[in-house]
Amino acid sequence: MSILIDRSTRVIVQGITGRDGGFHTQQMLSYGTRVVAGVTPGKGGEKVHGVPVFDSVAEAMAESRANTSVIYVPAPFAADAILEAADGGLGLIVCITEGLPVRDTLAAYHHVAEIRERNAVKDGAAGKPRLIGPNCPGLISPGLSKVGILPGQICKSGPVGVVSRSGTLTYEVVHQLTRAGLGQSTCLGIGGDPVIGTNFIDALALFEADPQTAGMVLMGEIGGSDEEDAAQFIRKHVKKPVVAFIAGQTAPPGKRMGHAGAIISGGHGTASEKMAAFAAAGVPVARIPSEIPALIAEALDRRRGRRTGRRVTAKSASRRPKPSTNGARAGRARATAGRSGAKRRTAPARARKR
Amino acid sequence: MNLHEYQGKELFARYGLPVLPGQVATTPEEARDIAASIGGTVVVKAQVQAGGRGKAGGVQLANSPEEAFEKARDILALTIKGLPVRKVLVTQAADIARELYLSIVLDRSRKLPLIMLSAEGGVDIEEVARTSPAKIVRRPIPLTGIRPYQARALFQPLLGDVRLVAQAADILIKLHRAYTEGDCTLAEINPLAVTRDGRVLALDAKVILDDNAEFRHREWATWRDPDDETPDQRLAREMGLSYVKLDGDIGCIVNGAGLAMATMDLIKHYGGEPANFLDIGGSSNPEKVTAALRIITGGAALGNDGSRVRAILVNIFGGITRCDDVANGIVKSLETSPLQVPLVIRLTGTNEDLARRILSDHGLSATTSMDEGVRTVIAKAQEVAA
């Protein structure tokens, strides 16, 4: 299992004939993602890397039975692309585009939310559509599917759910996790804008419910209060271990640090406030990225120890077996092993499934 | 982009908000002429983007054109919170009975514009928020907008008088239009003044525009003040680099905002001080790397003192950014302008091997670990300092 995307994910690429859209269509195809159609108004009938292009989402949907859209449309037209995808009936909309005006994102966000509310009572449509981003790298469920621009080769299937506001920092940490033998269930970049479709809480709730995920790594940054809200949520609703990191500990107030959302304003949104919120919620906070793998390994071991009744020392984390070449199978095996002690926990849904 | 008061008032006036007549001056002579054309008592206000202008002596009354000349001369000689005053706004004075605070700001968690209103205007609202948060009314505005009766209900308890309430409600509705259509992330009136003759006026304007919306606002280009930007900042903006100058001695060039922040944090963690935040962005363009090195090493032409920088770290995790492009940028830059300080390179990801070959052909090398790169650059900076 994984969250949001897997082998059944069928993707349409909005903006497929553009430079980024074309390049990443190729990358997604070579990773094994089922890219079933592309959309660029006025370019219907063309093909990009063998993928048929349509003039509209509606036409693409009629031909392809897609369930996911990824958007590489230039910023002035990206919000319209989100609306078109939502109205077209897609369940997951991933907006990679950077630089959307906040006003446009707000309109798109609330439109998507409205349709989701209507769908809540429909069978099989609950929680849909979901918007991820904008200004995000997308997501990858290692070995199953990737939607967006995350580099596939640094990931490996396993028990860690990764959620982050940044792009390359996510790659950095995922790379370090993989090298430490810690594979990932899904890596999700939620985006660096002040207004985004899916926040930390949404992602944590999905990971909490996902059987493959045994623990989560959350990477936040300065600005806003999503991290503080996530800390509250973890305290009340998350049983799986979470490790957090906050970028921008040395950022000066009032300066926008690259991301539109990464700004300390009015004395709020500082890294220290966010780190304190996580610490208060019992979440270990890494001071630097390279501390993350050991912290999550330790947390996963503790959890396994609790479930099996065996006492596991932090040291055994470093004696973890070398990653198998077949990452996907190894990860699944480990996740299953982790579940063997699930009876001890109050997880009725999971117990029923078994 | 943050607007100056006079620019914010231009935006407000365009949406019919009541602002008093005034004009901006860069010399005492201009200030005198503007005061003469307005007539009566005027206020001379420093146009710098800093709070506490009044306390710093940057806002002064003048009863005659001659006095406006003198006050403008004094204010134009001031430096407020490190910012030299280059312009003053000369505007009609108001006979103020009461001062309120009114703003509309983006509420990130509710994902809606938020009205903030307080009976305590004219003061630092962040201070009010800290000491007596109950004195601030917060009200989200639904996407459908705010109705006149809702606006009136909001001001009724604060103003009482029906004529004042009607004026204030009208101001709020117009401010919301200015905020939305103007693509603001903050539109603030502080103070929103009630005059003794029963008028409600916007006596100040603080506006922050959403930079991402610039493509649909041609008029913004005229608001961009060249004096607000140092030459290095301008070069960074023109090259599409996110750049913030800091006080340390270790320059850094990174791809991605999150990784760039984490790199700064790591430098500090290992005992160094970053000289800047610099994100070359997602695309790979050798020219961006060249420009980044130029900005960090600085010099007179760029208006910053690069001599503080004792060592430079390039930290790249290749995704869309190709490591070979970055390597080419470094090599090209060093050929045309050799560095006076040590350069430490960390490259991982897309086309990493190719990048290493390019670097080694030119006698350079790169590490793969971010931690190692940071520790090395700190050691090099310390060697230079010694």
Image (cartoon, coloured by chain):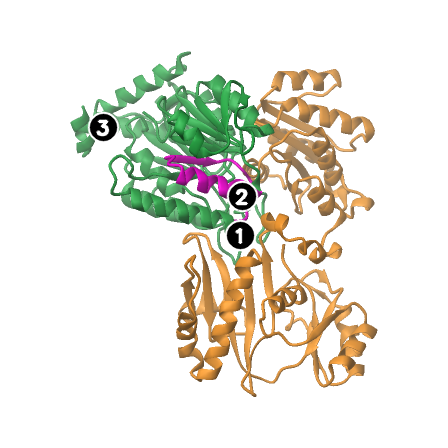
Chain colours: A green, B orange
Residue B368's place in the image compared with B93, above or below, is above
Residue A82 in the magenta stretch? The answer is yes
Residue B250 in the magenta stretch? The answer is no
Asked whether residue B146 appears in the rendered view, the answer is: yes
Q: Which of the numbered marks, if any, corresponds to residue A264?
A: 1
Evaluate whether label 1 is on the same chain as label 3: yes
Tag 3 residue: A307
Give how far across and how far down residue B315 sits, in percent: 62, 30
Chain of the residue displaying label 2:
A
Residue at 52% across / 47% down in the picture? A261
Give how far across and how far down residue A272 sits, in percent: 47, 48
Q: Which is nearer the eye, B261 or B169?
A: B169
Give how far across and how far down residue A231 sits, in percent: 36, 45
Mark whose residue sits in front, 1 or 3 = 1
Question: In the rendered structure, which segment of residues is drawn in magenta?
Answer: A76-102
Residue B179's place in the image compared with B295, above or below, is below
Tag 2 residue: A248
- What whole-number distance in Å separates the C-alpha atoms at marks 1 and 3? 41 Å
Amino acid found under the numbered disc labelled 3: Arg
Q: Return the disc, 2 or 1, that comes first in the chain's sequence.
A: 2
For mark 3, does the 10 Å Cα neighbourhood hold few (<14), some (14 to 19), or many (20 or more) residues? Answer: some
Asked if residue A317 lies left or right of residue A100, the reply is left
The image quarter containing residue A129 is top left
Chain of the residue displaying label 3:
A
